Image (spheres, rainbow, N blue to C red):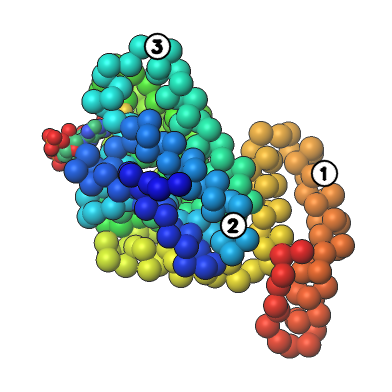
Amino acid sequence: MTYENITYEVEAPLAVITVNRPKRLNALNAQTVAELIAAATRAAEDGAVRVLILTGAGDRAFVAGADITEMSEMTPLQALRFAEAGHRLGELLEAMEKPVIAAINGYALGGGCEVAMACDFALASEKATIGQPEVNLGIIPGFGGTQRMLRRVPIGMARELVYSGRSLSAEEALRVGLVNAIYPADELLPKAKELGKLIAGKGPLAVARCKRLMTAGLGLPLGAANELERQTFAALFASADQKEGMRAFLEKRSPSFQGR
Ligand code: COA
């Protein structure tokens, strides 16, 4: 598939998806959402990729929201289809085994904030501005923002942000835990790649199972989630990676994981 509105690059063990509509501040129209779904699926299926990084082109925006020009003409049915596609993208990023890092290089508003929250975690540049401004337009977040914000930041802050449409600076986003770290603009992508490579060097099955447990566990009672953890812990003792990881420790050398 060729992409019009994104770029997809593999620098094994990393893949980088860049939303590339800088004249529209990387706003998400339906075509861009479809391309993001296609590229994320590719990354999920590519055995050479261990970590996916999502970012935006240019020095102003990660994604400044859903495309308001396109949305302004939508019927309710078209709006439903658009929201469904946004939800499919979020669910895909959460369901894929490989960690996904959002590198928020500027405005992450509306759909941009929602896509970033569907990633495993986010790093920000000093220029990041993050929020859910939909109420300014007389609509609500439609790509999972009302729900994922509740799970990302303290509940009162989630409500304040969604009801008021107020955006956070990078510093404020760090304080409420919406991003993990802030870097100067030119260091953001290198830092995201460095962290991606660190994760990619760990046992791939182990990282994949951690992601699955920590995503699924959010929707489960603690007892059921812990039971799932015990079963997953035990099952990994049948893996070559567990044998290699422990043998390497005992032999005082670096492990060579195969992801099986
Ligand atoms: N959808 C469509 N186009 C958008 C867009 C969006 N979400 N965000 C920005 N753009 C376009 C602008 O219309 C403008 O196009 P133009 O050059 O043809 O006029 C271009 O991108 C640059 O944006 P501009 O508004 O001129 O930049 P700014 O620095 O003055 O303001 C923002 C930047 C992000 C504050 C402002 O663009 C904005 O509020 N965007 C909408 C954010 C939003 O509500 N997102 C949620 C949508 S549900």
Which circle marks residue 227 in the picture? 1
Residue indicated by mark 3: 76
Where is residue 167 shown, x and y percent of the image? 28, 37
When the figure is inspected, residue 83 is found, relative to residue 240, above or below; the finding is above
Q: Are marks 2 and 1 in contact (CB under 8 Å)?
A: no
User: Which circle's residue, 1 or 3, is located before the other in the chain?
Assistant: 3
Where is residue 20 shown, x and y percent of the image? 30, 48
User: Which circle's residue, 3 or 2, is located before the other in the chain?
Assistant: 2
Disc 1: CA contacts within 10 A as few (<14), some (14-19) or many (>=20):
few
Between 99 and 129, which is closer to the camera in this rendering? Answer: 99
Between 3 and 248, which is closer to the camera in this rendering? Answer: 3
* View extreme (bottom): residue: 252
Q: CA distance from mark 2 to mark 1?
A: 30 Å
- Disc nearest the viewer among 3 and 2: 2
Where is residue 118 shown, x and y percent of the image? 50, 41
User: Which circle's residue, 2 or 1, is located before the other in the chain?
Assistant: 2
| Rendered residue at 66%/59% (across/down) | 207
Residue indicated by mark 2: 46
* View extreme (front): residue: 1
| Rendered residue at 51%/37% (across/down) | 90
Q: Are marks 1 and 3 in contact (CB under 8 Å)?
A: no
| Rendered residue at 43%/13% (across/down) | 77
Q: Please, what is the three-letter code of the amino acid marked with disc 3?
A: Pro
Q: Please, what is the three-letter code of the amino acid marked with disc 1?
A: Glu
Disc 2: CA contacts within 10 A as few (<14), some (14-19) or many (>=20):
some
Say if disc 3 is inside 8 Å of ligand 1. Answer: no
Q: Please, what is the three-letter code of the amino acid marked with disc 2?
A: Asp
